[in-house]
Image: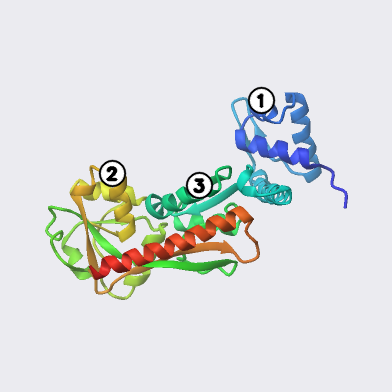
């Protein structure tokens, strides 16, 4: 089958999508601006749709352009990986691996795995897409990420989920809060305190809502925020308490030395709410050699993390 465009046209379009400028993209692929524009025009004529919106101030992809860019990028990345695999050891060449993950695992699990990976794969570029749980799942499902690290808050037949560790939600509160010294707090006791909730688009919020459904134990929401870091900022300011996974609280405390001495996590019970962190990958797509080796490091690191959590629980 003969296509009315070639690989160079696709590379030019990828450069335009990345840089958002005809001038910059033309320079990146070593073409004059008129020659570069002809490539984009040729691609649009071949597809029969407009891929970009041109104005005097900016260049933006159309809806069709964004969809084509997503699918085209997967094809070009697969082609790049195939060529690297044929040429030799990808650990010594400029290959790229894309990981999608929820932000709470970055300070611990992700940084530890990447430190080990950099030692054995110094030439591999790793792109980290830190995003909400449903966005992680979407990035993996659509091929924008090689694999993901998060929790499966919604079943998806296209994705394979490999559990790494299980963790409980705790109550984040300021050290001088009346509940801070408690060994355990029941959900029913939170009615007397201002509660800081994550937005309904959050995967953690979905886990909590499902666990509390039908129990009649819905905390009185005084504030609703988009991110865990914002929730903790409000907690530290004395505006209320928040429920979050233990590792998310630990990660935030590691990131901010100022917040570390001021916040504590108290176990929540009746009911105890837990989430399972794990690796997500597409069932029908094999990982490149470099991606598979990073995936294996996360498997090892996740099991180590589970062991540390178990030992901490016995202490």
Q: Of the numbered discs in the image, which one, if any, rests on residue 59? A: none
Which residue: 24% across, 74% down?
Answer: 270
- Disc 2 from disc 3: Cα separation: 27 Å
- Disc 1 from disc 2: Cα separation: 41 Å
**Disc number lying in front (2 or 3):** 3
- Disc 1 from disc 3: Cα separation: 37 Å
- Residue 245 is at least partly visible in this image: no
* Among the two numbered marks 1 and 3 on one chain, the one whose residue lies closer to the N terminus: 1
Residue underneath mark 3 = 119
- Residue 249 is at least partly visible in this image: yes
Could you say where residue 159 lies in the image, as x and y percent from the top left? 57, 66
SS for tag 1? Answer: helix
SS for tag 3? Answer: helix
Residue underneath mark 1 = 23
* Among the two numbered marks 2 and 3 on one chain, the one whose residue lies closer to the N terminus: 3
SS for tag 2? Answer: loop
Dividing the picture into quarters, in which one does residue 10 lie?
Answer: top right
Residue 88 vs residue 8, the one in the foreground: 88
In this rendering, would 311 be left or right of 27? left
Which residue: 20% across, 70% down?
Answer: 188
Q: How packed is label 3: few (under 14 Cα within 10 Å), some, or many (20 or more)? A: few
On screen, 31 above or below 179? above
Which residue: 51% across, 50% down?
Answer: 117
Residue underneath mark 2 = 256
Q: How packed is label 1: few (under 14 Cα within 10 Å), some, or many (20 or more)? A: some
Marker count (numbered): 3
Could you say where residue 202 lies in the image, as x and y percent from the top left? 40, 57
Residue 10 vs residue 205, the one in the foreground: 10
**Disc number lying in front (1 or 2):** 2
């Amino acid at each position: 089958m003969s296509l009315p465009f070639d690989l160079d046209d696709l590379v030019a379009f990828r450069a335009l999508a990345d840089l958002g400028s005809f001038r910059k993209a033309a320079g990146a692929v070593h073409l004059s601006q008129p020659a570069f524009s002809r490539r984009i025009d040729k691609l649009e004529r071949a597809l029969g749709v407009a891929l970009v919106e041109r104005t005097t101030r900016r260049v933006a992809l159309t809806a069709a352009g964004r969809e084509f860019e997503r699918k085209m990028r997967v094809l070009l990345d697969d082609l790049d990986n195939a060529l690297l695999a044929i040429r030799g050891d990808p650990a010594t060449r400029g290959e790229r691996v894309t990981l999608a993950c929820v932000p709470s695992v970055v300070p611990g699990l992700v940084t530890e795995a990447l430190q080990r990976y950099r030692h054995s794969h110094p030439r591999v570029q790793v792109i980290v897409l830190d995003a909400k749980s449903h966005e992680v799942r979407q990035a993996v499902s659509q091929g924008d990420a090689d694999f993901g690290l998060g929790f499966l808050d919604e079943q998806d037949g296209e994705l394979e989920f490999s559990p790494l560790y299980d963790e409980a939600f705790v109550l984040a509160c300021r050290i001088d809060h009346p509940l801070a010294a408690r060994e355990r707090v029941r959900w029913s006791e939170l009615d007397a305190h201002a509660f800081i909730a994550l937005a309904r688009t959050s995967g953690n919020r979905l886990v909590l809502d499902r666990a509390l459904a039908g129990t009649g134990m819905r905390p009185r929401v005084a504030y609703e925020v988009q991110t865990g870091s914002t929730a903790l900022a409000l907690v530290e300011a004395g505006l209320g308490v928040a429920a979050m996974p233990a590792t998310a609280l630990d990660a935030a405390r590691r990131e901010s030395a100022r917040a570390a001495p001021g916040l504590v996590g108290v176990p929540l019970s009746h009911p105890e709410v837990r989430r399972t962190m794990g690796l997500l990958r597409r069932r029908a797509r094999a990982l490149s050699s470099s991606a598979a080796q990073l995936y294996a490091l996360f498997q090892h690191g996740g099991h180590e993390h589970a062991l540390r959590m178990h030992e901490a629980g016995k202490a």
